[in-house]
Amino acid sequence: MMNKTITREDVAEHLRDHLQHRLSLEELVHWAETVMMDGDLESDHNDEIRDVVARIGVADVRAFGLTWQDCEELLSCLGYKARVDVAAG
């Protein structure tokens, strides 16, 4: 059960964490499914957040997946821009 309002920033942070390998696809999908069932979405951006979270929630289905381009588009829907930063290992 969630008890905080889910904002665009929350969704963007979860996508960022997934892209940076801090959150597995399975964990991201589980979070999105929980938000869709129990989440209170930020009222000013309810439609955008709902659409993006719904898309994330089906990312574990082979036909949908979640590519880098998908993440860029989802972030753009939320008012964010994805950037790539490359650093020496």
Image (cartoon, rainbow, N blue to C red):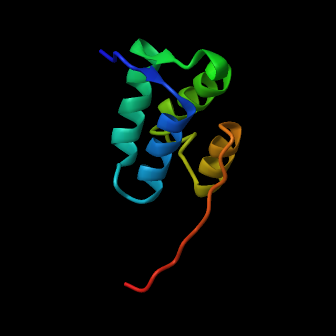
Number of disc labels: 0
Q: Quadrant of residue 44?
A: top right
Q: Quadrant of residue 54?
A: top right
Relative to 85, residue 32 above or below: above
Relative to 19, residue 73 above or below: above
**Residue 65 % position (x, y):** 53, 45
Which residue is at the far bottom?
88
**Residue 87 % position (x, y):** 46, 81
Residue at point 63%, 26% (across, down): 51
Q: Quadrant of the N terminus?
A: top left
**Front position in the image: 71 or 63:** 71
**Residue 74 % position (x, y):** 64, 41
Relative to 8, residue 16 above or below: below
Position of 29 compared to 41: left or right? Answer: left
**Front position in the image: 22 or 8:** 8
Residue at point 40%, 46% (across, down): 25
**Front position in the image: 66 or 49:** 49
Residue at point 35%, 41% (across, down): 26
Position of 16 compared to 50: left or right? Answer: left
Q: Quadrant of the C terminus?
A: bottom left
Residue at point 35%, 49% (across, down): 23
Q: Quadrant of residue 35?
A: top left
**Residue 15 % position (x, y):** 49, 46
Relative to 45, residue 30 above or below: below
